[in-house]
Amino acid sequence: MDSFKGFFQSLPRVGAWFRQGDIQPEEVQVFWRHMQRCFPTDAVCGHVSPARLSPRAGVAPGHCLHLPFEVGVPRAGWDLWRQVVACTHAVQHALQFEEDGLEVSRASSAARARSEAEALRCDLELHFWRHGTTPPLGSLAWRLRAQGCHAEDIAGAGHVLALSAASIRQGAVENEASHVALQWLEAHVPHLRWDRAYHSRAR
């Protein structure tokens, strides 16, 4: 269903119904502007080569975020919430570049796996904020395979993600990009947080 959510949100007339209870297009745009003010980056809407593209997340060569979608415009595979997660994920990669000076796509298999595992922690942290749980970790491994990571490096990243998921379920937030993203979400769309949304539906 998630892969079609963006498509349904993009439909004329009925798209508004599928956007109910979700972050709204203008809020996504404001969120991106906020993140880009906090972490100077340039968002470029367009295609990049498969070798440089992290599936379902904006790729971040240096401080340039190449996006397969227009910010705030839902499309198949890129619903509005997914665009928020993609922004946070890509900004974390930009921070890695700032610290290490090496683009993920040009690093070794082990370095790519470590880098992606760290950025995927953003996905887990935002997913927990929104849903109160962490997603199945096995579904994340294919992202590393798509980046040409070796099996042993994927296994190591899976172990790191499992440890991260356990701490996230206890309320930990480690990544810098996630801290800034969650502060904005709490301030502007607190009703989307899982516990508040649950109690709202229960009334």
Image (cartoon, rainbow, N blue to C red):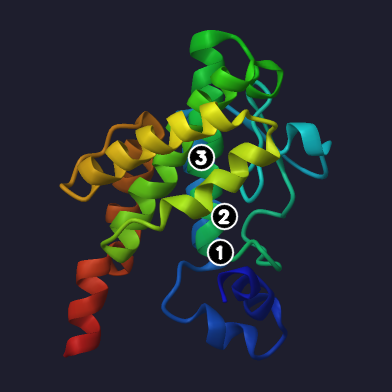
Sequence-first tag of 3 and 1: 1
Instruction: Measuring from the top left, give residue 121's x and y in whole percent.
Output: 40, 39
Marks 1/2: CA–CA distance: 5 Å
Confirm whether residue 30 shows in the render.
Answer: no
Residue drawn at x 28%, y 32% as measured from the top left: 174
Instruction: Tell me, for residue 157, which label it has, or none.
Output: none
Proximity of marks 1 and 2: CB atoms separated by less than 8 Å: yes
Marks 2/3: CA–CA distance: 10 Å
Q: Is mark 3 on a helix, strand or loop?
A: helix
- Identify residue for label 3: 89
Proximity of marks 3 and 1: CB atoms separated by less than 8 Å: no
- Identify residue for label 2: 83
Image height check: is 24 above or below 183? below
**Callout 2: 10 Å neighbours few (<14), some, many (20+)?**
many
The amino acid pointed to by label 3 is: His
Image height check: is 20 above or below 39? below
- Identify residue for label 1: 80
Instruction: Measuring from the top left, give residue 182's x and y in whole percent.
Output: 32, 47
Proximity of marks 2 and 3: CB atoms separated by less than 8 Å: no
Sequence-first tag of 2 and 3: 2
Marks 3/1: CA–CA distance: 15 Å
In the drawing, does residue 70 fall left or right of residue 21?
right
> Split into 4 quadrants, where in the image is the C terminus?
bottom left
Q: Is mark 2 on a helix, strand or loop?
A: helix
The amino acid pointed to by label 2 is: Gln
Confirm whether residue 98 shows in the render.
Answer: yes
Q: In the image shown, does 59 or 148 lie closer to the viewer? A: 148
Residue drawn at x 49%, y 60% as measured from the top left: 27
